[in-house]
Image (tube, grey):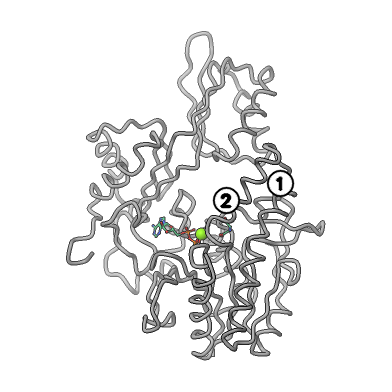
Amino acid sequence: MGRIVMKFGGTSMAGSERIRRVANIVRRQQAAGHEVAVVVSAMAGETDRLVNFCREANPLYDPAEYDVVVASGEQVTSGLLALTLQALGCKARSWLGWQLPIHTDDAHAKARIGEVENEALLASMAAGEIAVIPGFQGLSDHGRITTLGRGGSDTSAVAVAAAIQADRCDIYTDVDGVYTTDPRIVAKARKLKYVTYEEMLELASVGSKVLQTRSVSLAMKEGVRVQVLSSFIDDDATPADEIPGTMIVSDEELEGHEMERQLITGIAADKNEAKIILTRVPDRPGAVATIFGPLAQANINVDMIIQNVGRDKGETDVTFTVPAADLLRAQTLLEAQKAAIGYNRIISDSKVAKISVVGVGMKSHAGVAATMFRAMADRGINIQAISTSEIKVSVLIDEDETELAVRVLHTAYGMDATDEAA
Ligand code: ADP
Ligand code: ASP
Ligand code: MG
């Protein structure tokens, strides 16, 4: 007998009929002889709706109160799933973040999980109950409700799996695995049977929202076995235990499964970045520290940075990106620091997208970036910024060209599925 954590995303939980489908999948997993804990998201669209209410109430909202509002979507679906399971004759009990509790730090709206207390869960499961846990939420040291950042239910699921030493954490979503790129953008995307933690981490961090980035780093750190699979399945679908989806594996495990590693594993697009340009910043030591220090203190993550070559009069333009959701705060902060930084103008643009190609294979291959730049140039797509890591190349482009760029690159790296394979 194994112990399985099953996580269901927003589309899977959207409405009574879908929750019944989920309850059936959960019941079958338990009937296969496993102890089962379930982590659920809010219904699709619900968290966006709640976020909008916060913005309408106060554009510069207090993140602690935002958390009180946005955590409520998961409370609803966890109760509804427990009720639906009971209606099917299963024993089920919900456990809210504060009841277990799931301890987090107090970085509201992007809290990090510390410890997940497992006593109540283990006792509930040992008594034959299905434990249903709302994802996305936790409890701060100050006794206040926190949320983990958008898409955070994936991280809740992995943290619960680690805490109860589950044999597997199955992430059920609306696609049947991890693909070479978003299958909703590129019809010829190919499903991957295996992807390494390292590659999945990089893909997630550059915008493949199929898994939240922190869920992957936590799974890697805690050695949690994660599978991504579809909840939109019939009763006769391949059981989850036979791995119908994509398994996230270690490097060594992948070697055992695949003869030859692909140069590029996947391509991701992220439209949630915004670009800021500060013009005529004094070109002297300490100048960039006065820009990025306050942003870091305000917990705003800066991603791509370009400091242009100095112009005349010892001045330079500094360009960088921040999450679009933090743009207003970043601008307000930078305007307050105008005299200290000494820039001339602040220009912002949220109509940008970051396109990234990821693959461990590029560690040992030259020319990946050159192929990218050539393919984009051939289609007249202008590159506004570039950043690289050992296994990734990212470019910033006009948001309107996102889909085109992803398709062009998917073809350029020879990743399109052939008709037979598709
Ligand atoms: P959930 O609500 O289940 O958490 P998400 O919407 O967060 O689901 O994530 C699933 C979506 O991720 C898919 O519908 C798909 O459009 C998108 N996606 C982006 N990149 C990929 C990829 N490489 N492979 C699979 N899906 C991807
Ligand atoms: N409901 C939250 C969100 O939409 C968390 C999640 O679905 O993972 O971001
Ligand atoms: Mg998600």
Q: Residue at x 70, y 50 (%)?
A: 108
Task: Place residue 398 in its image quadrant.
Answer: top left
Could you tell whether 250 is left or right of 92 in the image? left
- Residue type at the position of mark 2: Asp
Q: Looking at the picture, how far across and down is residue 240, in whole percent?
A: 43, 79
Looking at the image, residue 355 lies above or below residue 147: above
Q: Nearer the viewer, mark 2 or mark 1?
A: 2
Measured as percent of width and height from the top left, residue 127 is found at 68, 90
Q: Would you place residue 200 above or below residue 371 in this image?
A: below
Residue drawn 47% across the image and 70% down it: 172
Which residue sits at x=50%, y=81%?
Answer: 24
**Residue at numbered disc 2:** 48
Q: Secondary structure at mark 1?
A: helix
Residue 85 vs residue 253, the one in the foreground = 85
| Number of disc labels | 2
Name the spot of residue 313 as percent of width and height, x first: 53, 8
**Distance from Cα at disc 2 to Cα at disc 1:** 15 Å
Mark number displayed over residue 343: none
Q: Badges 2 and 1: C-beta atoms under 8 Å apart?
A: no
Q: Quadrant of the N terminus?
A: bottom right
Looking at the rendering, in which quadrant would you find the C terminus? bottom left
Q: Which residue is mark 1?
A: 63
Of the image marks 2 and 1, the number of the one nearer the N terminus? 2
